[in-house]
Amino acid sequence: MMTLDQIPLGSKALVKEISRDASVKRRLLDMGVIPGIEIEVKGKAPLGDPIEILIRGYKLTLRKNEAAAILVESY
C-alpha cells in the first residue's frame, strides 16, 4: 500500500484507510474520503502541493500532508 500523495497523475486508487493519528481524519471522512471509495488523481501543482482528486463525481483539492494520511491501493 502507498499514500495518496505518492500516486501518479491520472491514476486511480482505492482508499484503504485514513491514518489514525491524522489531525484531519474527521474532515476527510465528512468530505466522503472513506475506505472502499475510488479516487482518481486529476492534478498536482508543480511542487506537488496541493493535489486535485476526483471522488464521488466532484473535484476535491487536498494539501500534501492531508493526502499523505490517506492509505490507498493503486490499480
Image: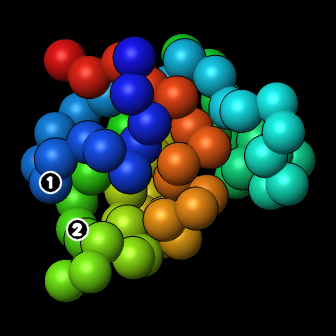
Q: Is residue 8 left or right of residue 32?
A: left
Position above or below: 40 against 24: above
Q: Quadrant of residue 11?
A: top left
**Quarter of the figure that contains the C terminus:** top left
* Residue 7 in view, yes or no: yes
Q: CA distance from mark 1 to mark 2?
A: 6 Å
Residue 44 place in picture, x, y as percent = 25, 71
Residue 21's x, y, as percent? 84, 39
Compare residues 48 and 60 and report the one nearer the observer. Answer: 48
Label 2: which residue? Answer: 43
Q: Which residue is mark 1?
A: 9
Tally of numbered tags:
2
The kind of residue tagged 2 is: Gly
What residue sits 72% from the left and 50% below the top?
A: 28
Which residue is at the front of the view, 33 or 7?
A: 7
Asked if marks 1 and 2 touch (Cβ < 8 Å), the reply is yes
Quarter of the rendering occupied by the N terminus: top left
Kindly give the residue lying farthest to the bottom in the view shown: 46
Q: Left or right: 38 with respect to 26?
A: left
